[in-house]
Image: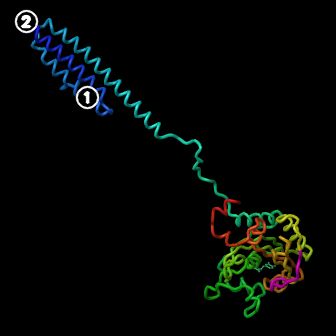
Amino acid sequence: MSSNLSLKKLILDLERLESEAAKQIAEANDADSVEKLRVSFLGKKGSLSNLLGGMGKLPSEERPVIGQRANVLKAELQKLLSERQCFLKEQALAETLSKESIDVTTPPIGTSLGHRHPLIATTEEIVDLFCGLGYQVAEGPEVENENYNFTALNIPKEHPARDMQDTFYLGGDLLLRTHTSPVQIRHLEQNPPPVRIVAPGRVYRRDAVDSTHSPVFHQVEVLAIDEGLNFSHLRGTVLAFLKAFFGDLPVRFRASYFPFTEPSVEVDVEWRGRWLEVMGCGMVDPAVLEGLGLDPERWSGFAAGLGVERFCMVRHGVDDIRRLYTSDLRFLEQF
Ligand code: DAH
């Protein structure tokens, strides 16, 4: 009778445990809580083990009854626990998915590809055109001395032509080159004629900044020295170059003066209804050749110099030179 009682009590306890566990599992709201419940019901020191500890008091024939019940209960609780875990996982996933909705219409944040600055592109285009005519690229330093920048170009000290180019002097006889013409001298010193060179580079003048002036700007110098070169060669070369760059704009040659060429001309193209000066050029002055130890009776040639900014501005219809230096992407990305 007494054993029957404890058997009944044990079964009752198991049933209570089952309903209590089922209730708590159904209420657990995250993975951690479910795991804690597993430990507290099924762990080594959990409720089920505790209950089964009382089994020893039962007569041996009744123990299997309880053992079997306990196994069923254990399996049942394990099933409830893993179902709850799955449910919570799915719920969390569904929640993140609904929060992290993806707007497929937003524009992509890709990195845009860079490209060459219009001034660089213009320089390269000019240089390329002369390379196509058989010219080679030459370069010279931006810090020059008075000899290369002036004297060797037939602009002696005190000559008023030095005032044509307001100069940044650096002390001693050093200065920032005011034009790319010194490259003519440097190249001829190292390379005996015949020569054909095109020399791009940065130049400096003490000009106040406005829509057409900048204290730093870019030039391309051209020089051809050979036997028998005359003004027709200069004219033909300049016309071929301008046509290749600008297309069929009207061109005019206007008599001018440069100390290092004789005769000298300035070249204008007609643009937006008016003549616009685009380059200076002329036949290399015999005094320049003599200064280099070259016999002007044998060697002759022509030189030209142009401002890259102006070519760039005419090509692209840019109205203010400052736009080329301020690195405003809204402007630059148009090119
Ligand atoms: N160096 C001149 C200047 O900066 C431009 C120039 C004119 C260059 C005539 C030349 C030339 O080579 O022949 O104003």
Tell me which segment is drawn in magenta: 252-261
> Could you tell me which quadrant the N terminus lies in?
top left
**Residue 47 spot, x, y in % from top left:** 19, 23
Whether ligand 1 has any atom under 8 Å from the Cβ at mark 2 is answered as no
Q: Earlier in the sequence, mark 2 or mark 1?
A: 2
**Residue 234 spot, x, y in % from top left:** 88, 74
Placement of 26 over or under 138, stated as above or below: above
> Could you tell me which quadrant the C terminus lies in?
bottom right
* Residue 254 on the magenta segment: yes
**Residue 247 spot, x, y in % from top left:** 86, 64
Query: In what quadrant does ligand 1 lie?
Result: bottom right
Looking at the picture, which amino acid does disc 1 mark? Leu
Residue on which the image places disc 2:
1
Looking at the picture, which amino acid does disc 2 mark? Met
Question: What secondary structure is found at the residue carrying circle 2?
Answer: loop
**Residue furthest left in the image:** 2
In the image, is 251 to the left or to the right of 164? Answer: right
Placement of 50 over or under 265, stated as above or below: above
**Residue 150 spot, x, y in % from top left:** 73, 85
Density class for disc 2 (Cα within 10 Å; few <14, some 14-19, many ≥20) is few
In the image, is 247 to the left or to the right of 209? Answer: right
- Who's the residue at 37% across and 30% down the image? 88
In the image, is 3 to the left or to the right of 123? Answer: left
Residue on which the image places disc 1:
37
Q: CA distance from mark 2 to mark 1?
A: 35 Å
**Residue furthest bottom in the image:** 158
* Residue 265 on the magenta segment: no
Query: Which mark is nearer the camera, 2 or 1?
Result: 2
Whether ligand 1 has any atom under 8 Å from the Cβ at mark 1 is answered as no
- Who's the residue at 63% across and 66% down the image? 327
Placement of 186 over or under 30, stated as above or below: below
Density class for disc 1 (Cα within 10 Å; few <14, some 14-19, many ≥20) is some
